[in-house]
Amino acid sequence: MKRKKPYFPLKTKKKAVQLVSVGLLTEDQACQKFKISLKLLHEWQRWYDRYFVQPYQNPTAMARKKLSDKEKIKLLESQLKESQQQAKYEKLKREAYETMINIAEEEFNIQIEKKRGARQSKK
């Protein structure tokens, strides 16, 4: 005979998952408090993520929202600023790498970088 699952109201499910996700209760404590199994708590967590968390983290949901011109400009300016910072970081990284190689070549008197147009040596 098939066993029926006990009914838990929506508020109870949300409260259990939120208490665990915030860190006020451990999973074991939540299972004892709400008299549920760990497997059921994990089911509730997946359900909560699917219906209450993911829709707000989905980037396509943001794309569907129509942005005003000012919001578009702010978004583009922030993307531009971020890309400029990334380019500046990459430039500094490249310069540091080149400096490190030049110092190593001078200190240890070994050739690290190949000269342009140099042929490979035959063995």
Image: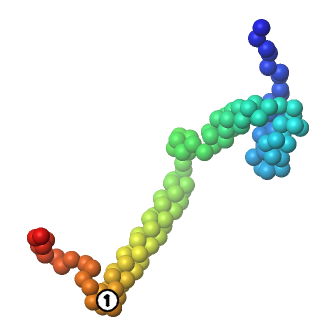
Element on which disc 1 rests: helix
The residue type indicated by label 1 comes to: Phe
Horizontal and vertical percent for residue 100?
A: 37, 83
* Residue for badge 1: 108
The C terminus is located in which quarter?
bottom left
Position of residue 73 relative to residue 93, above or below, is: above
74 or 32: which is nearer to us? 32
Q: In this rendering, does residue 44 appear at all?
A: no
Q: Is residue 46 above or below residue 84?
A: above
Task: Determine the residue positioned at 79% across, 14% down.
Answer: 3
Check the image and name the residue furthest to the bottom: 107
Q: Is residue 96 left or right of residue 53?
A: left
The residue nearer to you, when weighing 82 against 24, is 24
Is residue 64 shown above or below 118?
above
Location of residue 118 in the rendering, given as x and y in whole percent from the top left corner:
13, 75
Picture coordinates of residue 109, whole percent (x, y): 27, 89
Q: Residue at 67% x, 35% y: name it.
A: 46
